[in-house]
Image (spheres, rainbow, N blue to C red):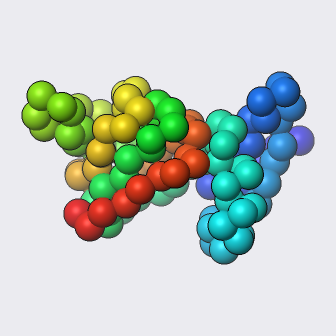
């Protein structure tokens, strides 16, 4: 089966099964209870960015892999010791530790794959 990870997310279930679920607005319009159930496990999703991320985010329940497929971003991480900038160009990845606020400056249209346990994700204005 072929799928587009921007429109169909992969829910990596704790028991080892992978469930394909609708992404985009259909995913984010789910009830809080439905989102909570899905985001307790690992979720793989892809996003296209043409502008800086509108908010900072933080995942309290797990690390996140931010994998740049194409484009150019500067990923900013608010580490306990201060701000850290991770430049990603063309393709590359960064592991964002659990509980670290992060945000991206988009330098060129970019496609980014995210792998995270999203339960409890918090946002704040950029």
The residue at the point 83 percent across, 25 percent down is 16
Looking at the image, residue 14 lies above or below residue 23: above
Residue 4 in view: no
Looking at the image, residue 56 lies above or below residue 100: below
Residue reaching furthest to the left: 82
Q: Position of residue 31 (x, y in %)?
A: 70, 71
Horizontally, residue 40 falls left or right of residue 87, namely: right
The residue at the point 24 percent across, 38 percent down is 77
Residue 105 in view: yes
Looking at the image, residue 52 lies above or below residue 67: below
Q: Position of residue 27 (x, y in %)?
A: 69, 64
Residue in front for this viewpoint, 121 or 45? 121
**For residue 56, which quarter of the picture?**
bottom left
Q: Position of residue 100 (x, y in %)?
A: 31, 38
Q: Position of residue 49 (x, y in %)?
A: 40, 58
The residue at the point 74 percent across, 42 percent down is 11
Q: Quadrant of the N terminus?
A: top right
């Amino acid at each position: 089966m072929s799928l587009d990870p921007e429109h169909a997310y992969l829910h990596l279930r704790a028991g080892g099964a992978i469930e394909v679920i609708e992404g985009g607005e259909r995913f984010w319009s789910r009830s809080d209870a439905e989102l909570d159930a899905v985001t307790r496990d690992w979720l793989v999703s892809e996003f296209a960015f043409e502008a800086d991320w509108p908010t900072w985010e933080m995942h309290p329940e797990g690390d996140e892999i931010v994998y740049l497929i194409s484009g150019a971003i500067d990923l900013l991480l608010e580490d306990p010791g201060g701000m850290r900038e991770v430049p990603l160009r063309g393709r590359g990845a960064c592991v964002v530790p659990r509980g670290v606020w992060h945000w991206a400056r988009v330098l060129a249209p970019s496609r980014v794959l995210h792998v995270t346990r999203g339960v409890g994700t918090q946002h704040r204005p950029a």
